[in-house]
Image (tube, rainbow, N blue to C red):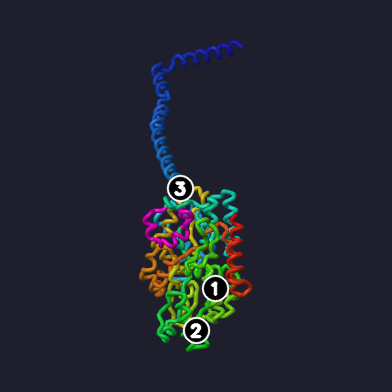
Amino acid sequence: MTKQVCSIAMVLVILSGLLVGCGPAPTPQIVEVEKQVVVEKPVVQTVIVEKQVPVTKEVIKEVTKEVVKEVRVEKSVVTVAYNNYFNMTFGPAGTPFEELKKAVAAKYPNIEVRLNVMPYEAGPWHDNYVTWFVAKDGTTDLLGVGAYWTAEFAAAGWLLPLNNIIDPKILSQLNPQYMKAHTYKGDLIGLGPWWGGIGGLYYRKDLLAEVGAQPPKTYDDVVATAKLVMAKHPEMTGWTWPALNDWVLVNRWVEYLGGFGGTYFDAANKCSMTSPEGTAALKFMVGLIDQGISPKEVTTWKEEDSGVRFASGTAVFHTGRQDMMFWLDDPKKSQIGGKWGFIPNPAQPNGKSTGYYEGWAFSINKYSKQPEAAAKVLEVMFDFPMQKAFNLSQGPIQANMNVYKDPDVIKNNPNMPLIQAVADTATPPIPTPLYSEMANILAEELHGALTKIKTPDQALASACKRIDSIKQ
């Protein structure tokens, strides 16, 4: 036990000596280590991050500015209402809608044009508009409006007057008679036509030359020349025109009435078609049938029916729209190629040459939310380049008078210059909000006179009485 104690004691002594021999680590070295352990580098990194933050914020500001700029360039969408003919072409130009979109995009990149397709039938088309107007719906900005709707829509305040909206430079290019046709009580309601029809007198140049007659200027000239030709060619009809119990008869009546110096209404806005001039016009129409200048079957003819007789080469004169001139020289459709002429309708000494005008204009919806953009599109539509495109796509007639002198237009249709003189006689439908009702009354009463159910005096007296009653 004593040896073990001694051994343990000796071990302890040795260990103690060793510890004393090693000694503790110098204090300065420990301090140096502690200084190096101080986290100085993370602090430097933090400072670097703080320097980058402003740069990052600056980039964000620039991006924000770019976004704001893009938002400000918003396109205005101008919607046009017309039937699907606006998506068709019948000539060397593109469709009216394609040409319009291109023209507007070139001049106004911030305006997009869209088409709201209307029914082909005038009745449903008209009723669509009325529904929109009653609801004060301005979704569709530009409306294709028939001349016989002008007074109705204008009187109701549904269309925006254009007098002080459209650039005068554009208006100066348009035919004054056409602008007058789309004016109601001094307000220009629409620009037109972009397409339409106007009545004139077709005649056989070869047959008139054969009897030594000049193209007629008065209604009496027409009858005298027809009789001369029919004396040499008994198989010929003197004069064809449509007189079905329909609005087509009213169209022709407008021309006869104006040609004899008659008017629709007097200064008191009463029906004045019973005047001596109006009575003379209707008696003349009846006399054409009585004398055999026009066949009795005219009272069953639509415009197309009466045109066929003339194109077949069996009539001297024909009253109709300008449409026929585009196919009368086609040997597949006509027997009189190169033998015809087209002139303004005749007029008696106290009357004026009158061509019934049934063109289509474009008007601005009173409830449009962007009338300024709509007006810009309207100006593009009736400036010369677009009017030329309409002509080459759809054929005449157009409002811009420069179209009729354009070499490309004349090359496409050499008969274009003939239309200008007829266009100057353009006379609109009866200027009344009650056109449909009045046209139906007139068709019935005039047809009654032509078919001998009534005398001309009786028919006109009844027509005026009925017309004045519905105006009350």
Q: Is residue 88 magenta?
A: no
Whole-percent x, y for residue 461 in the image: 59, 65
Q: Quadrant of residue 344?
A: bottom left
The residue drawn where x is 41% and y is 72% is 416
Q: Amino acid at mark 1?
A: Lys
Q: Amino acid at mark 3?
A: Glu
In the picture, measured across the screen, residue 167 lies left or right of residue 291, that is left
Furthest toward the top, the residue is: 2
The residue tagged 2 is 313
- The span from disc 2 to disc 1 (Cα, nearest Å) is 28 Å
Give the number of the disc on residue 283: 1
Numbered circles on residues, count: 3
C-beta proximity under 8 Å, tags 2 and 3? no
2 vs 1, front mark: 1
Segment colored magenta: 166-190
Could you classify mark 2 by the number of other residues whose Cα lies within 10 Å: few (under 14), some (14-19), or many (20 or more)? some
Return the residue nearer the eye: 407 or 438.
438
- The span from disc 2 to disc 3 (Cα, nearest Å) is 60 Å
The residue drawn where x is 44% and y is 85% is 207
The residue tagged 3 is 74
Q: Is residue 173 magenta?
A: yes
